[in-house]
Image: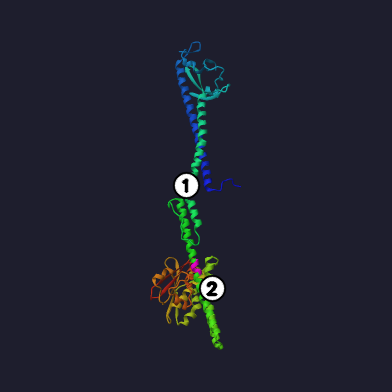
Amino acid sequence: MSFLPKNVRTRLTLWYVLALTFILIIYASVSISLVYINLRNNLDDQLQQDYEIVENLMRVMPDGSVKIESEDDPYFHERWFQIWSSDWKMLYESSPFTGKSLPSISREEESTSGFHFQSMQLNNNVRVRILSGKINIEGKWLFIRLVRSEERLWNELSGFIRLMLIALPIAIFIAGFGGYFLTKKFLSPIDEMTAKVRKIGEENLKERLPVINPDDELGNLAHVFNDMLERIQKSFERLKRFTSDAAHELRTPLTAIRSIGEVGLQDYKDAKHYREIIGSMLEENRRLTHLVDNLLFLSRADAKTLDKHLIKLELKSFTQETVEFIQALAEEKNQIIIIRAEKEITVIADRALLKQALLNLLDNAIKYSPENSEIIVSVDTEHNNAAFIEVKDNGPGIPEEHHEKIFERFYRVDKGRSREMGGSGLGLAIARWAVTAQGGKLTMESKTGEGSSFRITLTLT
């Protein structure tokens, strides 16, 4: 079970306080160490000054004893120092302290060249700082040891530590409150966006989130949300339009079937008349079935449940087979479909999807081309490692203002004429999806009065 609060503002404040506490502890530790080192260095400097004074005033007598000039100077009554011989005998000691004793010169002090510093705690728990040094006077080695109390050092250090212990909690407490209010201020745009998002529904999808600063992360988040809302709005509008168009398209053949049936039931007539009525109803049923099949195909395409089986496909023979499949429709209008394919070309494609796309293009070309005309189907390669199938008709062409929308679902250039020809406005939309789904591209070139050309571009193997 997590003990972290659920509120993001509180969690950010907590992490901020923890991070700041860690930093302040490190800062305090470093500061205390630096203060201690500085105080100890000052104490060592004082010991060195004492050493120089004792060294200048020290005299060795002929009997081997040591005499200090100006012994009556108060300086020597305030300093603790010892002079030892090389055989570890104390020759002189000035000790203003009572009840305190130092151990004999250690091997480490004896072997050290120059000054040797060490800290020590005496038997009465007094901390002292000791400086030891060797000096040669008239060929005789002597050891000088000077001692200063560290009580002042530790008192000052303790005072600094107490100051830190008081200042750190206060700083953390202030930082916690400051971090909470800063976090609240920085997260307020998210609260505004949250309140705005709660108000956005299907009735007001045009609403967008406020972008206070487009250059920071929250502004970028608002931009991403607005882009998502834009896509949702377009999808929702497209779905509404698709549903409305589908209902309208389905109503037309259903109304026709009902009307034909009602007219047929008005009067009793011969069998030939009823066969014609049944034939008309079957024709409308065929159109209705074709429309439902197209709607089902697009629905499965949108849901991405259509399986694609990409294989190596030879375009010349494939195009010939597809043209033969639809040749009968062209013959009804005395049209000729000419295939121009001079070489065999192999591409990677889905045979079923490509056939459906090409059939839709050929069906449109047959519908909108006049009788006794030619439809040219070309198969060739391009310079950019691509192959194409192009269907060119001799129809009325498509005005330029319709070029961008011609591949939209249920879109027709001439709605009345399209319904007369049995079109539903889905053929080009299905063709483009079928081509795009296998990595291809469907493009169009058309001018009014000069016919239209649709090209399927695929990648060569």
Q: Main secondary structure of the magenta part?
A: helix
Dot 1 or dot 2, earlier in sequence: 1
Which dot marks residue 185? 1
Between circles 1 and 2, the one closer to the viewer is: 1
Task: Pinpoint residue 420: horizontal percent, then vertical percent.
Answer: 46, 78
Task: Pinpoint residue 81: horizontal percent, then vertical percent.
Answer: 50, 18
Cα distance, mark 1 to mark 2? 56 Å
Residue situated in front as seen by the camera: 446 or 116 = 446
Which dot marks residue 98? none
Q: Are marks 1 and 2 in contact (CB under 8 Å)?
A: no
Give the extent of the magenta segment.
Answer: 239-243
Q: Quadrant of residue 391?
A: bottom left
Query: Is the residue 304 above or below the residue 145 in the image?
Result: below
Q: Which residue position is annotated with label 2?
A: 292
Visible in this render: residue 347?
A: no
Residue at image x 45%, y 19%?
52
Residue 381 within the segment the image draws in magenta? no
